[in-house]
């Protein structure tokens, strides 16, 4: 399976949202948390003003703040006015439109997040905020102290210092005004473990302002290239919660999973991979002509693979750099190997999905 979220973050975020180290990121989150205040606000009293031709908002007990791009989009959504329309209006006109259209129900209580004179978010009072500093604090507590896990750096197709395709050697640590995204991995198991060497990875994302949910993924994989694509992901487990009632439960699960992830690869999960290496996909798994043809035919019949895809996957499975046989593990590795040669992300993903389906036969 090919995981692309780290790559998307690398190429879509501005450089000031890409951090050079975990302590640097943690300090930014800590500073933000110290400056941030949650201000309960009665919707009937929220007021929009023109200050020196700039839009400002009065929330709570007369806190006048400047909306960020994200909080303005939340306000626009509440008013049912497209944000791009607001941005084209003169400030006086925009103020009049917002004051006239902002919903002011008697039951409409809002929760404003104010930081250094800015309005970072304006949500319903039922919003349950999870601060980045608390999320990263658990990561620091359980994953990082003993050095088993580190912020992820490219492991292949890069230079000695791990330079990525943005031209720097920063790890996969991202945080902006809207959300955060971090990726950590363990050291690689020996290549002679019978599984080609695996790492354990964990991706964590969160938003303090409601731009996205809180969630995390745990998985095993081999390499991350210079464009932050995560190759050969196995046993991917995902957890996600919106910032409301279920958040506390999922955050508790998150802490438990961090404790579990801090250990070595669990024996029962390692057994799945080993079973895959022992179960033949075709015949006795040896690279005979009959077995190759049987494997290609099964891929086409049961997995919907094309004739060309089947042939390439089987050939790659028999490559000495892969298991070199027609076991489930060999075929799965064959698919992920040819995925690396694809130009289009969609084709890469399709091949990685096929690899996961084959490997699932061992569970």
Image (cartoon, helix red, strand yellow):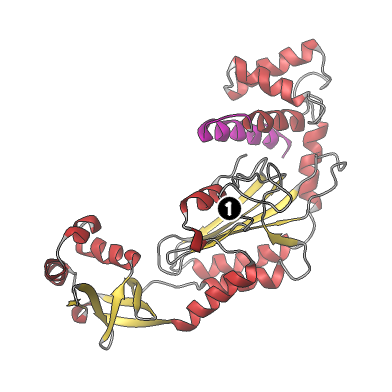
With respect to residue 94, does 340 lie above or below? above
Of 353 and 94, nearer the camera is 94
Q: Residues within 10 Å of mark 1 (few under 14, many from 20)?
A: few
Q: Position of residue 57 (x, y in %)?
A: 24, 77
Q: Position of residue 234 (x, y in %)?
A: 68, 43
With respect to residue 13, does 273 lie above or below? above
Q: Is residue 269 left or right of residue 42?
A: right
Q: The C terminus appears in which quarter of the rendering? A: top right
Of 4 and 31, nearer the camera is 31
**348 part of magenta stretch:** yes
Q: Is residue 298 visible?
A: no
Residue at mark 1: 238
Image quarter for residue 149? bottom right
Q: The N terminus appears in which quarter of the rendering? A: top right
Q: Which residues are magenta?
A: 341-363
Q: Is residue 184 left or right of residue 129?
A: right
Magenta segment's dominant SS is helix
**231 part of magenta stretch:** no
């Amino acid at each position: 399976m090919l995981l692309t979220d780290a790559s998307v973050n690398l190429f879509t975020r501005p450089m000031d949202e890409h951090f050079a180290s975990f302590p640097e990121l943690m300090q930014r989150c800590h500073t933000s948390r110290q400056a941030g205040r949650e201000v309960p606000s009665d919707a009937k009293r929220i007021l929009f003003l023109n200050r020196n031709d700039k839009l400002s908002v009065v929330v709570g007990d007369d806190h006048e703040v400047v909306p960020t791009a994200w909080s303005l989009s939340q306000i626009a959504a509440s008013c049912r006015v497209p944000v791009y329309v607001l941005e084209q209006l003169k400030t006086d006109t925009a103020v009049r439109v917002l004051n006239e259209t902002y919903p002011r129900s008697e039951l409409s209580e809002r929760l404003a997040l104010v930081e250094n004179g800015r309005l970072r978010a304006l949500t319903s009072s039922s919003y349950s905020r999870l601060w980045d500093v608390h999320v990263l604090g658990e990561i620091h507590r359980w994953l990082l102290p003993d050095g088993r896990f580190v912020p992820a750096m490219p492991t292949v197709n890069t230079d000695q210092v791990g330079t990525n395709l943005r031209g720097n050697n920063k790890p996969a640590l991202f945080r902006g005004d809207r959300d955060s995204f971090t990726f950590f991995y363990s050291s690689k198991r020996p290549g002679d473990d019978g599984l080609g060497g695996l790492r354990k990875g964990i991706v964590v994302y969160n938003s303090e302002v409601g731009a996205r949910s809180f969630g995390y993924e745990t998985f095993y994989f081999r390499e991350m290239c210079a464009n932050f694509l995560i190759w050969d992901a196995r046993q991917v487990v995902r957890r996600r919660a919106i910032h409301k009632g279920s958040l506390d439960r999922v955050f508790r699960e998150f802490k438990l999973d961090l404790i579990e992830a801090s250990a070595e690869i669990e024996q029962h999960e390692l057994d799945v991979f080993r079973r895959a290496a022992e179960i033949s996909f075709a015949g006795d798994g040896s690279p005979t002509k009959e077995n190759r043809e049987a494997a290609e035919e099964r891929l086409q019949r049961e997995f919907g693979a094309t004739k060309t895809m089947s042939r390439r996957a089987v050939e790659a499975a028999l490559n000495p750099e892969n298991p070199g046989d027609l076991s489930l593990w060999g075929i799965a590795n064959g698919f992920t190997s040819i995925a690396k040669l694809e130009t289009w992300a969609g084709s890469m993903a399709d091949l990685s999905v096929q690899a996961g389906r084959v490997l699932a036969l061992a569970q």
